[in-house]
Amino acid sequence: MKIFSGNSNKPLAEKIASFLSLPLIRASFKTFPDKEIFVEIFDDLKGEDIFLIQSTSFPVNDNFMELVITLNTIKQCSPRSITAVIPYYGYARQDRHTTPQSSIASELTARLLQVTGVNRIITVDLHTPQIKKYFTLPVDNLSMTTLFCEDILASYPLENLLIVSPDAGGHERAQVLAHHLNVKAITLHKARDEITGTCNMQFKTSVIDQNCIIIDDIVDTGETLCKAAEFLMQKGAKSVNAYCTHRILSGTSLEKIALSPLQEVVFTDSIFSSISRKGCTKLRQLSIAPLLAKTIRSYA
């Protein structure tokens, strides 16, 4: 078994390799002036089980092309098997036709990955689990439920604790976590006012004096997360915190979180971020390296 790291999240790959007591495969990544990617491997991979760690996060297209080119390069080295460990799977939000003439990018990326000769995919909290149907090879979609559950139990009293999904898409995720914690869960539903055209949030359960924890898979602009927190506080919540798997944090998302009523937002290290926390001290990180290392070990 050997561990290979792409460039998208080297710190996570190094942690995983450390847990497994393995060195990273030696390789060279070069970028030509026109941004073409060239990959060369220096170690002997013949007959080995290779695990490539690469999130397809920002810059998404560069990191995705590096992923498929690296997988193709590994294939040339005659390994026994190739597993792509993609902690954050980009293009997962484009899983269906939004208009009759729109693309399904998640289906296309699945096809592109499979022609590289990869044997298995390991990912974390796919935005839409149904994406697995676009693959003809095994896809292991790891859930953050256990990791988040353990941290919540260590950080918050369960009395008056309420798990919240900020939209209908995360309903099942919130329900599963609430079941593990033996607390209640609610889902916020967006309703558009036909007269004003504005969107309002609705729910059926009272949140008065409840300590709310919002659960989501992706935070990109932070708009949905921060509006949900504001809405819950307006409806009488005692506090609002959040647990989110993938921190994309585009644009002014950090400023929005800093100015919001959120007390703390917990992310994982599925996406490497060099963003300074200066001006926003509400962020805390949990590592998924032990979980990924344990999963990789189970396949060896």
Image (cartoon, grey):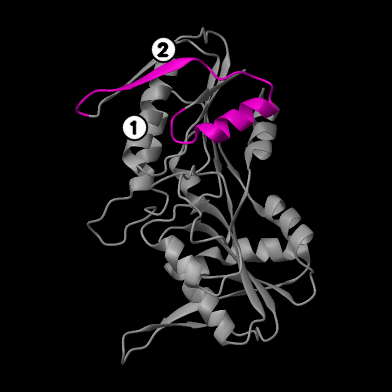
**Viewer-nearest residue: 293 or 19:** 19
Q: Looking at this view, name the residue that lies furthest to the front.
A: 278
Q: Residue placed farthest to the bottom in the image?
A: 195
Image: 209 above or below 265: below
Q: Which residue is mark 1?
A: 65
Say what amino acid the circle numbered 1 marks: Met
Is 9 inside the magenta-drawn segment?
yes
Q: Position of residue 179 (x, y in %)?
A: 74, 64
Location of residue 73 in the rendering, given as x and y in whole percent from the top left corner: 40, 17
Tell me if 15 is positioned left or right of 37 in this view.
right
Looking at the rendering, which quadrant does residue 235 occupy? Answer: bottom right
Image quadrant containing the N terminus: top right
Residue behind mark 2: 76
Q: Quadrant of residue 282?
A: bottom right
Which amino acid type is marked by label 2? Gln
First in sequence: mark 1 or mark 2? 1
Q: Could you tell me how far apart the alpha carbons at marks 1 and 2 are, in whole angstroms? A: 17 Å
- Residue 202, horizontal then vertical, whole percent: 52, 83
Which span is picked out in magenta?
6-34
Asked if 87 appears above or below 82 in the picture, the reply is below
> Magenta segment: does it hold 90?
no
Q: Is residue 222 visible?
A: no
Q: Nearer the viewer, mark 1 or mark 2?
A: 1
Q: What is the quadrant of residue 222 in the picture?
A: bottom left
Question: Residue 78, percent across and down?
Answer: 48, 10
Q: Residues within 10 Å of mark 2 (few under 14, many from 20)?
A: few
